[in-house]
Image (spheres, helix red, strand yellow):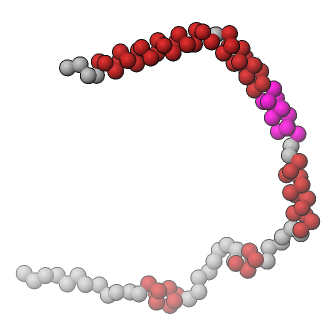
């Protein structure tokens, strides 16, 4: 039994594309992009000034967050100053627990 001839003629993809002709593009061309209307320098400056000013809502929100942050800091400071002794005891307990847990791994 002879082998079947399964060879196929090679088709050069670039040559095939050239034979079809120029491609019809559906979107805007490069010339359209380059010729698009652009803002003048004065308009750009105005836009930049508007961005620098920012929005009133954002400014109010930031102010409110700053006030909340200050209140949280005061509460935290009071906690630290009043409960300083108890926190040191908690740290010692945690150290003891870590030492105990570390010992268990080395026992056989």
Q: Residue furthest toward the left?
A: 1
Residue in the image at 62% along x and 80% along y: 24
Task: Please report the bounds of the magenta region as a residue range.
Answer: 56-67
> Where, quadrant-wise, is the N terminus in this rendering?
bottom left
Horizontal relation, residue 21 to residue 8: left or right: right
Label tally: 0
- Give the camera-side residue of 90 and 53: 90
Q: Position of residue 86 (x, y in %)?
A: 58, 9
Residue in the image at 86% along x and 57% along y: 48
> Where, quadrant-wise, is the C terminus in this rendering?
top left
Horizontal relation, residue 52 to residue 32: left or right: right
Which of the 4 image quadrants contains residue 40? bottom right
- Location of residue 57 with respect to 54 vertically, above or below: above
Q: Position of residue 74 (x, y in %)?
A: 75, 19
Magenta stretch: helix, strand or loop mostly: helix
Residue in the image at 80% along x and 73% along y: 36
Horizontal relation, residue 49 to residue 73: left or right: right
Q: Position of residue 55 (x, y in %)?
A: 86, 43
């Amino acid at each position: 039994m002879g082998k079947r001839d399964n060879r196929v003629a090679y088709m050069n993809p670039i040559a095939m594309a050239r034979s079809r002709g120029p491609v019809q593009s559906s979107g805007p061309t490069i010339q359209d992009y380059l010729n698009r209307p652009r803002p003048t320098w004065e308009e750009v400056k105005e836009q930049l000034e508007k961005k620098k000013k920012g929005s009133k809502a954002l400014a109010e929100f930031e102010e409110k967050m700053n006030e909340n942050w200050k209140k949280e800091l005061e509460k935290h400071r009071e906690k630290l100053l009043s409960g300083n002794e108890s926190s040191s005891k908690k740290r010692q307990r945690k150290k003891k627990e870590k030492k105990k847990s570390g010992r268990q791994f080395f026992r056989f």
